[in-house]
Image: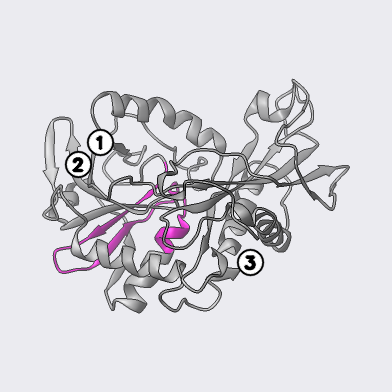
Amino acid sequence: MEKKNIDWANLGFGYQETDKRFVANYKDGAWDEGALVSDATIAINECAGVFQYAQTCFEGLKAYTTQDGRIVTFRPDLNAQRMEDSCKRLEMPVFPKERFVQAVIDTVAANEAYVPPYGSGATLYIRPYMFGSSPVIGVKPADDYQFRIFTTPVGPYFKGGVKPLTIKVSDFDRAAPHGTGHIKAGLNYAMSLHAIITAHNEGYDENMYLDAATRTNVEETGGANFLFVTKDNKVVTPKSDSILPSITRRSLMVVAKEYLGLEVEERVVPFEEIKDFAECGLCGTAAVISPVGKVVDHGKEIVFPSGMNEMGPITKKLYDTLTGIQMGRIEAPEGWIQVIK
């Protein structure tokens, strides 16, 4: 298929409408067959559950053109499982995992002309999401739901290369113990907007959230998990029931152990330990790893030995290996790569 006439090298990380999106509706206790449609507009009642009580969740993943010309996506089965977990917590119907993966495949295939070419630095971002569509005025779950997937071509998250971030220890709490921090609910992101705008206005790139109960342990940022490297090259990630289980972070831990031969730990990370780490990064779909150069705790600066100019050496190896797997330059573990075309 002929590609769209898009300046791939200069794409930003924003929304651009593509030709097709997948839509399925849940009504009378069952999902319909779903279909690919051309219309990007959603028409639902003004009293829909999504508007009144934020009953919505979403996922994010990407499709790539690999070195050998295939179009693939990365571990969509884990996105399907995470959305199932989100739906159960929000009293929403589960869209079956097998159907989720197939809908991703079908939607990407239908928008093949928008999948950026290999080497362009761009990818096709995939956004599955679900929301309560029927009217709800009493505080309760909606009866009807809609599951949708749209795609949009996006450029690299970092224009002009990767520059280590400066982040602040937030005075806000991201998620309460026994709350919804472990699922990808829209409401989690709504409450983070004030905190991230505040950080940006103060000159910081992101927030470091501590646990809400004791404010002594590192949790995550508004949209990514932390990854630390010790001075003896051990890879450490924080463990908490209120952290979203990042698919990128979980994959990086496998890469660290199985591909790079490093020791890995998922454990509680006291904030007091931050000063002792050699490297720090944020893990997520958009950038894979965003290096952190400095953490500022109410005026007190902690600068990692890896510095403010480039990724640390272990972080760089992790980034290069995982992106190599995603782009087909390095053999992937079984089941990690879903071939679309």
Its colouring scheme is one colour
The amino acid marked with disc number 1 is: Val
Element on which disc 1 rests: strand
The residue identified by callout 2 is 295
State the extent of the magenta-drawn residues as a range. Answer: 223-250
Separation of marks 1 and 2 at Cα, in angstroms: 7 Å
The amino acid marked with disc number 2 is: Val
Q: Identify the residue at horizontal 52%, vertical 41% (top origin).
A: 180
Residue 138 coordinates in the image, percent (x, y): 74, 23
Q: Picture quarter containing residue 82?
A: bottom right
Element on which disc 3 rests: loop
The residue identified by callout 1 is 169
Q: Nearer the viewer, residue 43 or 81?
A: 43
Q: Residues within 10 Å of mark 2 (few under 14, many from 20)?
A: many
Residue 87 coordinates in the image, percent (x, y): 65, 47
Separation of marks 3 and 2 at Cα, in angstroms: 40 Å
Element on which disc 2 rests: strand
Q: Residues within 10 Å of mark 1 (few under 14, many from 20)?
A: some
Q: Picture quarter containing residue 175?
A: top left
Check whether the beta carbons of the residues at disc 1 and disc 2 lie within 8 A of each other.
Answer: yes
The residue identified by callout 3 is 340
Residue 30 coordinates in the image, percent (x, y): 85, 49
Could one spot residue 157 in this view of the protein? yes
Residue 77 in the figure: left or right of residue 145:
left
